[in-house]
Structure formats: structure tokens, C-alpha cells
Image (spheres, rainbow, N blue to C red):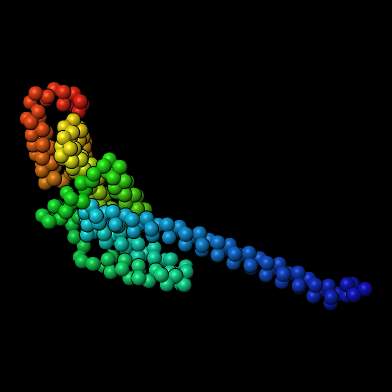
Amino acid sequence: MVLSDPIVIFFLAIIVVVSLYVARFAQQQQEKNMVRLYRLAALDRRRVQTKDLIRALRAMDEQPELMRVLNNSLKTDLEHMQSLDPARRDLEAELSQAQKAAGQGEPGKVGEMSEERKRKLIQGTSFDSDREVAINRQYINETVKLLRRLHDASKLRSDLFESLSSYLAMLSVSVAVNSQLNMGAKALQYGDRIKALGCFRKAEVSLQQGRLSTWERAQKQKEIAKRTQELLDGSNDQQGLLLMAAGG
């Protein structure tokens, strides 16, 4: 029989081995491609999240060193995405913008703040609702997590991680205090003295429990005391009711 011929058997064995090798190679390539696609998807989600954080933090207070770190992280992710998928031409403009933002200016002290930036900080952290406060404080929390990831991966110095984390903690308190003062002022415009006093009291509690820079703490203590006293002085015959209704 032909199948009993040693040469035929030898060639059949070779065909089987080659087929197994080709199948294994194809499986490995498929697995590699799946890993690549999974990694691309994860990087793309992180890219979107980092862009959201940059947008939110810039609107609250454009701290130069923090913006540099965030944009550098975004740049690294974009470069990784391009290496995994060179056909993604849509990332080129975004990468160029991130590279420019990551390299702008000279590194400075995290605590440095001009008078103009102080005014912008107050405006940028004065939100109109508790929902906006919660959303923006969550952005701050997510930024801290991103910084920790960079630090744990040895991509961020320990001293810079500590100083930026401390700055973000103070920014979160600024959001709470300034937003309550803003909501209290708006409540007064609509004649809601009880809500206004409640907002001022919440601002006071946030100020006492959180940590702020020296200049902002002193300013906010005076502002809260002044607004509260003006509200009470304007309601001499209802002070007791106001204090009880506001939980004071």
C-alpha cells in the first residue's frame, strides 16, 4: 500500500508537524493582536479620562506644574497608542498639542500664586450646586489617583507627588468653601435667608475641617464671618428662627 511506504509516511508526518506549527503560530498572532487591541482600548479610555481631568483642573485653577505632569502623562499614552497602532493618524494633532503643553515654561514651586491667579481660583471653584461640587471634587480625587499611579511606576518624584497631592487637597477644600459661599449669595438674591445661612455654615465647617493656604484661610474666615453677621443683623427679629432652621 502507498501509505505503508516510509517516504510517504515521512512526508505526511512533516505535513502534520507544519500544520500544527502554522496553527500554533496563527493562534499566537491572534492572541498578540487581542492583547494589543485590549491595551489600545485601555489606553484610549485613560486618554479620554486624562483629557477630562486636564480640562476640569484647568477651569478650576491652572496650576503650571500639575498641568505639565498631566500633559506629559497624556503624551506618553498617546505615543504608546501610536506605537501599537501606527495607522492612527487622528492622534497626531492631539500628540503635538500634548507635547507642547508638557514642555511649556520652567518648573516652579507648586505653592507659588500670583494675585491674578488667586482671583481666578476663587471664580473657578465657585459652583452653583452641590452636584457640580461633587463632580469637580471627584475630578480632583481622580487626579490624585493618576499621580499616585505615576509615582508608583517611578514616573513622578516623591517630593513632587507630595506637593501636588497637598495642593489638590487644598483645591478640594476651596471648591467646597467657595461654592457654598456662592450658593449662599445666590440664595440671598432670591430672598431665601435660611438657605443662605445654611450655606455659610457649611462653608465654615468645610473651612474648619479642611486645609487651605494661609492667605485663603484668612480671607475666607473674614468673608464667612462678615456674610453671616450681615445676614443676622438684617434679620434681628428672626435671628433665633434663622439659626434653628439653619442648624446653628
- Which residue is found at the position 13% from the left and 22% from the top? 240
Spot the residue most to the front: 190
Q: Quadrant of the N terminus?
A: bottom right
Q: Quadrant of the C terminus?
A: top left
Horizontal arrangement in the rendering, residue 102 relative to residue 119 (left or right): right
Spot the residue most to the bottom: 7
| The quadrant where residue 206 appears | top left
| The quadrant where residue 235 appears | top left
Q: Please, is residue 128 above or below residue 29 in the view?
A: above
Position in image of residue 5 (x %, y %): 88, 75
Residue 92 seen: yes
Depth check: 245 or 110 in front? 245
Depth check: 208 or 181 in front? 181
Residue 170 seen: no
Depth check: 240 or 202 in front? 240
Spot the residue most to the right: 1
- Which residue is found at the position 83% from the left and 72% from the top? 9
Position in image of residue 46 (x %, y %): 40, 57
- Which residue is found at the position 28% from the left and 69% from the top? 100
Depth check: 232 or 209 in front? 232
Q: Please, is residue 167 above or below residue 65 in the view?
A: above
All told, the count of numbered labels is 0
- Which residue is found at the position 20% from the left and 46% from the top? 126
Horizontal arrangement in the rendering, residue 247 relative to residue 30 (left or right): left
Horizontal arrangement in the rendering, residue 54 relative to residue 84 (left or right): left
| The quadrant where residue 150 appears | bottom left
Position in image of residue 147 (x %, y %): 32, 53
